[in-house]
Amino acid sequence: MAAVEPARGVRDARLGSGAPGGRASGDRVARGVRQAALRVATALVTAVYGVYRLHPVLWRFTARHYHPSFERFARLNAWMICQQAYLDVPAYRRYLDENGFRFRWWRLEAYRPTSKKEYVDRYSEDDRCWGGQIVTVGTVVDESSGSSGTPYNWMRSKDELRTVHANVAGYITLLFGSRRLFCINAFSMGAWATGTNTGLAMSKVAMVKNTGPDIDKIVDTLRHFGPRYTYLISAYPPFLKHLRDRLDAEGFDWDAHELNGFVGGEALTEGLRDYIEQRFVRVYSGYGASDLTIGMAGESDLSVWLRRSLVANSDLRALVLGADEDRTPMIFQYNPLETYLETTADDELLVTLNSTAIMSPKVRYNIGDEARIVSFPQMQAWVSQFPRLALAFERAFASQRMKLPFVLLFGRKDSTISYMGANIYPLDVENGLYLDNPHAASIESFKLSLLDIGGLEHRPVIHLQLRPDAALTPPQRDELRARSAAGVLRHLATVSRDIAQSLDEDPTASDVRVELHEHGTGVFAGGSSKIKNVYLVTSGEAAAGGGPTAGGQA
């Protein structure tokens, strides 16, 4: 239950210095002046931010001339947004007051972090808006994927959407330009309004067709318009793989066309990127969240190069991630003036959207992602310790020239299975599945589980769902299982010292099971009502899914 809102005088006293005479009329006037000044200052900063969104050229100029000193200004603005939310958002005021909030000048950490469970679930949509009011005209309701178990509704006002569209348009032109750009938007067009917003944002700088995730429509569109355009396909990462496989099967003339990819919604592995870029020219990923906003951060040539360098160079990896970190995060660049990011002591990401245009303010919001923040100068200093890498850094930087800081994203903490004292992540499994696998085109999706084989021992199981049109012979199924298991083990051994050592010391460590399922059967029975892939087998699926149509040990 929410705490009872304190009396106005008590609430106002917390904005002052805490002096005994805080209720005197003079102090009330001073507090009123401070509150008014805060509101005006926050509104002015938001207006200034709006200037560089007027045109993609200004957006690109800002991204390329960002200076580390702007970080202090971004943090100050985050503090102003938090304090104004305390004054003008009923739910946030009650949320802070129940923990005895006391006002502190310039201290962002004085504002208790919010989250879906602790904040969103406890207060109504109205109370989480400025002034406790929902602006209906122009507002679009976005629905989250439900990958956490329950779909949520998120409201975005007209002003907020205008901001989002301008940011996405500026970023896209930085990556792909705008000359004869044709965006085929394959994100879902249903209640998940991020797909619709992507199309609207792209329309600022490109011709757009919102096909949704319909491969037939996309193939027909490419045939109709032909090679005259630079195509940009926006979709979830697995969908681009399916599209590539379909076009290959139909003998698509890749040499005559230029296809690029822009993906989001889930992590993109370098293995999958390489597989898609065997046909596509370039593929980049963006980072966002339905409960926050789309386009919080995005990849660049530099961030992709850095991620691959962390795999290839163990010394650089130790500098950036630490000697004991086996995972390889996704790396994005972001603008703190728009989206202020910080991390907790447990490396959980806190997000503050630095704009009063956000109808339901997101302040120090914990989305549940594990991440680290690295400034551009710090990353450059680490790389500069290796002369060859320093030259490659400059070459990669020269493409987009964004001097924005980096967010190193490890993803959700509950997306792993533990084996041999190490965590196995979906990203690493996906990387391995596409390593020299001649039947990769037959894979629709995968899930992970642990199998109890008795004797207090468990083995990891990779469940592969075959595409509906997969027609594999028994020998080909055996080869798919063998290649999948071998590829995953090979990749895990390169990224995890614990697993590599286990493979040397204990032959049973290589006992990774791969089970094949016809489309929509076994643990994939009943299809999926969720937009995003879910990579862990739930207890209900394990109990009701039944045995695989083809399976065994690889």
Image: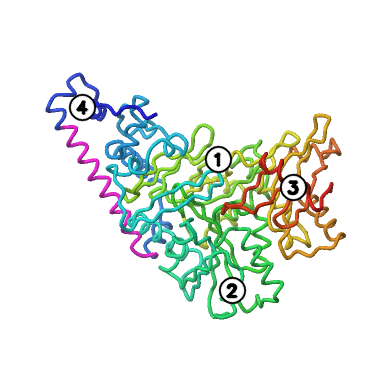
As for residue 191 lying within the magenta part, the answer is no
Q: Secondary structure under badge 4? A: helix
Where does label 4 land, which residue?
9
The three-letter amino acid code for the residue at tag 1 is Glu
Q: Earlier in the sequence, mark 2 or mark 3?
A: 2
Q: Earlier in the sequence, mark 2 or mark 1?
A: 2
Q: Nearer the viewer, mark 1 or mark 4?
A: 4
Nearer to us in this view, 479 or 435? 479
Nearer to us in this view, 475 or 419? 475
Q: Earlier in the sequence, mark 2 or mark 4?
A: 4
Where does label 2 land, which residue?
258
Where does label 3 land, which residue?
462
Q: Nearer the viewer, mark 1 or mark 3?
A: 3
Tell me which secondary structure the magenta stretch mostly adopts.
Answer: helix
Q: Give how far apart the Cα atoms at labels 2 and 3 are.
A: 34 Å
Q: Earlier in the sequence, mark 1 or mark 3?
A: 1
Task: Return the x and y of residue 189 as percentages of the image width and height.
Answer: 50, 62
